[in-house]
Amino acid sequence: MANNDLMEKVTSLCKRRGFIFPGSDIYGGLANSFDYGPLGHLLKQNIKKAWWKFFVQEREDMVPFDSAIIMNPKVWEASGHLQNFSDELVECKKCHHRFRADHLLEAEALKPEYDKAKVKTIADVVCPDCGGNLTEPKSFNLMFKTFLGTNEDTSTTAYLRPETAGGMFVNFKNVLDVTHRRLPFGIAQIGKCFRNEITPGNFIFRTREFEIGEFEYFINPKDWEKVFELWLGEIKRWWQDVMQINMDNLVWHEIPDGERAHYSKRTMDIEYKYPFGVKELHGIAYRTDFDMTRHQEVSGKDLQYTDPHTNEKYLPHVIEPTFGIDRMLLVMLLEAYHEEEAPTSKEGETEARVVMKFPKHLAPIQVAILPLSKKEELSVPSKQLAFELRKIFSVDYDETQSIGKRYRRQDEIGTPYCVTMDFASLEDKKVTVRDRDTMLQERVSIEKLKNYLQNKFEV
Ligand code: GAP
């Protein structure tokens, strides 16, 4: 399938089936904002739950956290966001479209006729929309400003957080005092972040409001190389075993000296081969003691850690793996989308089916109950079965249209198991369970169905 086709097909399926809608749709939308519909919400919840289980719940060295979105502006002064969290903005003098200078240079370098000798800086590039000349680049801060209370002046200016990290750095001492942890340990959270992006786009890839799952892993600096490698291994395990993606679609981009943030000694961007190019999916950085030093300086509070064995006193260093939740969801949609031929009820005939092959534990609907007839004889026990299964699984009940159409509908939203009750079920107390991927059908006793399905969903 052509790459643009895939993006278009996934976007259209998302709207048609209620994964993701354009934001504020009935008012004509709001550019690059999106609302997660019923299935999108469930898929996102499942990704977040899986992330939390893998990186937090199953580990003894991780502490959960949930900090405020609006924090004291000094947090952002200390972290450098107020001064430096900017992109270079250029504007076309003719059509007045605005662009990120680095994105234009990146796009230029991808053109077949690209000539490094001719394109040295943004001054050598013209507007990609109308060919007009561009203004000089100027710095544009991405922090979303707001005001606290009734006065709108500099004394009440506050910011929506651009990342969750700040809340965890400034609470390091609070967490240490109540949990009595020893290094190394991490503080983790998932939450909404806001950046006034110049050029959002590519569906949910870059938006102004998005979610991050990240953790700050506090270490003794002498261990940084070993701990970095350990987390890289865990990240690989996450993509391979939990998200179950095609690992060939990931690109492990070691950021070279000179291109990293000034405080980082090692950064790895984990990139993905999206239909619109190889771009960042998430990252991991060794941030040294930059953040702790800055927060100690600006707050005037002692944030040092004392090793209980050696009495050594030092500012912890930090390794930070960070994951965009919406980007992970986009990747799961792209990986899941399949078009294939499926047999119809007529011997030897096939028809095209779209099937979202999500890893089964992440599928928004896990089980669909599809009685073969709407008659009460079947609908009453089928609804009873759905009621029982809802206590454990996410369940859809559907008795409209032919069974073939209902299978196609469930395939398209990625439901791993369809359970059909027919008139024989009333006699033998068994139902037919159909597997989304193999399309094989199996008769399973109603009494054993819960256990049967539970085994299937175990990761
Ligand atoms: N604390 C480190 C940090 O925030 P980042 O690379 O700026 O690092 C983390 O952001 C992740 O958040 C990115 O790797 C990406 O997955 C996601 N992300 C960043 N900006 C985004 C945006 N505008 N829309 C959607 N996701 C975004």
Image (spheres, grey):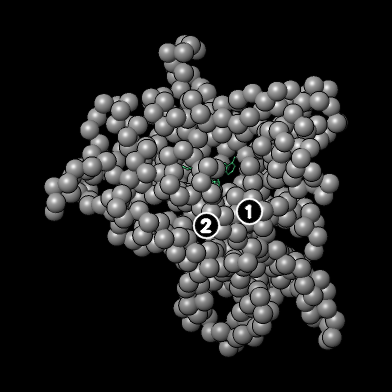
Relative to 2, residue 157 above or below: above
Task: Name the spot of residue 420 as percent of width and height, x first.
Answer: 64, 76
Q: Residues within 10 Å of mark 1 (few under 14, many from 20)?
A: many
Location of residue 59 in the rendering, given as x and y in whole percent from the top left corner: 34, 61
Q: Give the numbered dot on residue 47.
A: 2
> Residue type at mark 1?
Leu
Query: Ligand 1 is found in which quarter of the picture?
Result: top right
Q: Residue at x 37, y 37 (%)?
A: 291
Whole-percent x, y for residue 322 in the image? 47, 49
Q: With respect to residue 215, does 304 lie above or below?
A: above
Q: Residues within 10 Å of mark 2 (few under 14, many from 20)?
A: many
Residue 132 seen: yes
Q: How many marks?
A: 2
Task: From the image, tell me which residue sits under label 1.
Answer: 330
Classify residue 435 by image quadrant.
Answer: bottom right
Residue 306 is left or right of residue 411, and the answer is left
Element at badge 1? helix
Residue at figure coordinates x 47%, y 33% from the top left:
161
> Going by the image, does 394 lie left or right of 355?
left
Say which quadrant the N terminus sits in.
bottom right
Q: Secondary structure at mark 2?
A: helix
Residue 92 pos. (x, y %): 78, 25
> Is residue 453 rendered to the left or right of residue 59?
right
First in sequence, mark 1 or 2: give its number. 2
The mark lying in front, picked from 1 and 2, is 1
Up the image or down, 352 lies above or below 208; here it is below
The residue most toward the front is 117
